[in-house]
């Protein structure tokens, strides 16, 4: 199925219409004043500094960071980074604290027991499973972060220095299911972020056209998959009932139980490598994804089989 046909069935833009990712006059501008930018290592260092001296004011951190980094760091930058680090730290604490609770651990054990039970009673159960997930490509991720430069000069690529910026360039998502026998199923790459409408249309008009009655679809707890939305689950029921497909959810905070995450990693590494080697253009992520999958079409079923067997068949 061509990208144009997928776009017609799902109602999303399957071909990127933006031709240039960065204006020609700003390709080496780094997005702003270099004195106002902190690298990822600088932010981690600042985080450790704040944790060590939590009650000190921003001028102290600004002077200390300026001395260490070797260039002037303003207090406004420190305040912005502190706010960002606080949110990041809070999010990390929430994720790990929930992942370590007894309820999550019990749900993971129940999920593994259910998988073993189905495999014991139906030896070909894994062949009937389709693991679904979404991976995103942010524009800054496709550019080189390190490289060689003449002595006394910094390495400069087309991306801005602040890699944490979410406003730079387009965002692309790829939604796909993987199967032990078929490999990737219903792959759809498009510009934008996934929502419930895109997922429901993809499920009805793309994925379920390739499934058979009695197959099992495994989803994570993402909101657009209906993980915490009874309304989305209610819309999914008649679609799945008509196709005769069973639906299961992976426990929350358990990405390692979804072998599709391994496909996501393989896909991202392959696209980044193709962009770095000049075989694909970073402005056209959709075509880069399709080219990579077409290039390895013969190998992907065996690769997916290895990922699924690693998690479940040999566990």
Image (tube, grey):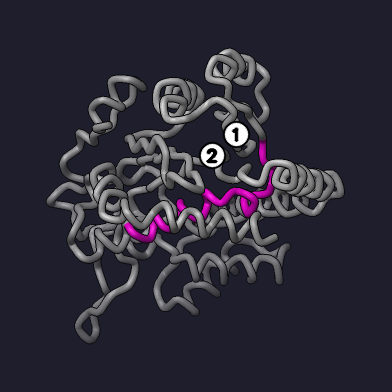
For this rendering, which residue is in front, 91 or 264?
264
Could you say whether the residue bearing mark 2 is in a helix, strand or loop? strand
Give the residue at x 68% y 19%: 230
Dominant SS of magenta comes to helix
In reply to whether residue 186 is colored magenta, the answer given is no
Residue 17 x/y as whole percent: 20, 33
Pick the quarter of the image with the C terminus. bottom right
For this rendering, which residue is in front, 265 or 37?
265
**Looking at the image, residue 54 lies above or below residue 286:** below
Q: Which residue is mark 2?
A: 130
Pick the quarter of the image with the N terminus. top left
Label 1 crowd (10 A; few <14 / some 14-19 / many >=20): many
Can residue 160 be seen in this snapshot? no
Q: Which residue is mark 1?
A: 216
Give the residue at x 31% y 55%: 296
- Quarter of the view holding residue 223: top right
Could you say whether the residue bearing mark 1 is in a helix, strand or loop? strand
Q: Which residues are magenta?
A: 249-270
């Amino acid at each position: 199925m061509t990208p144009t046909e997928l776009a017609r069935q799902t109602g999303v833009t399957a071909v990127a219409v933006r031709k240039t990712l960065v204006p020609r006059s700003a390709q080496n501008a780094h997005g702003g004043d270099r004195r106002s930018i902190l690298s990822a290592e600088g932010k981690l260092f600042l985080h450790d500094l704040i944790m060590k001296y939590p009650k000190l004011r921003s001028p102290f951190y600004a002077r200390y960071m300026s001395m260490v980094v070797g260039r002037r760091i303003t207090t406004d930058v420190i305040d912005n980074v502190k706010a960002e680090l606080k949110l990041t730290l809070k999010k990390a604490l929430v994720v790990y604290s929930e992942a370590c609770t007894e309820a999550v651990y019990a749900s993971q054990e129940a999920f593994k027991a259910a998988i073993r039970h189905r495999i014991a009673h139906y030896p070909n159960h894994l062949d009937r499973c389709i693991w679904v997930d979404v991976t995103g490509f942010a524009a800054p991720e496709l550019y080189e972060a390190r490289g060689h430069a003449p002595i006394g000069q910094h390495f400069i690529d087309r991306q801005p220095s602040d890699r944490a910026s979410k406003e730079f360039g387009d965002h692309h998502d790829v939604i796909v299911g993987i199967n032990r026998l078929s490999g990737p199923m219903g792959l759809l790459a498009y510009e934008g972020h996934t929502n419930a409408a895109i997922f429901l249309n993809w499920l009805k008009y793309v994925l379920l056209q390739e499934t058979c009655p009695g197959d099992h679809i495994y989803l994570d707890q993402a909101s657009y998959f209906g993980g915490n939305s009874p309304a989305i689950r209610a819309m999914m029921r008649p679609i799945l009932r008509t196709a005769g497909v069973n639906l299961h959810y992976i426990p929350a905070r358990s990405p390692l139980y979804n072998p599709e995450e391994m496909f996501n990693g393989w896909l991202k590494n392959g696209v980044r490598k193709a962009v770095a080697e000049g075989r694909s253009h970073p402005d056209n992520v959709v075509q880069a994804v399709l080219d990579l999958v077409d290039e390895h079409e013969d190998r992907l079923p065996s690769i997916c089989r290895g990922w699924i067997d690693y998690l479940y068949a040999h566990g």
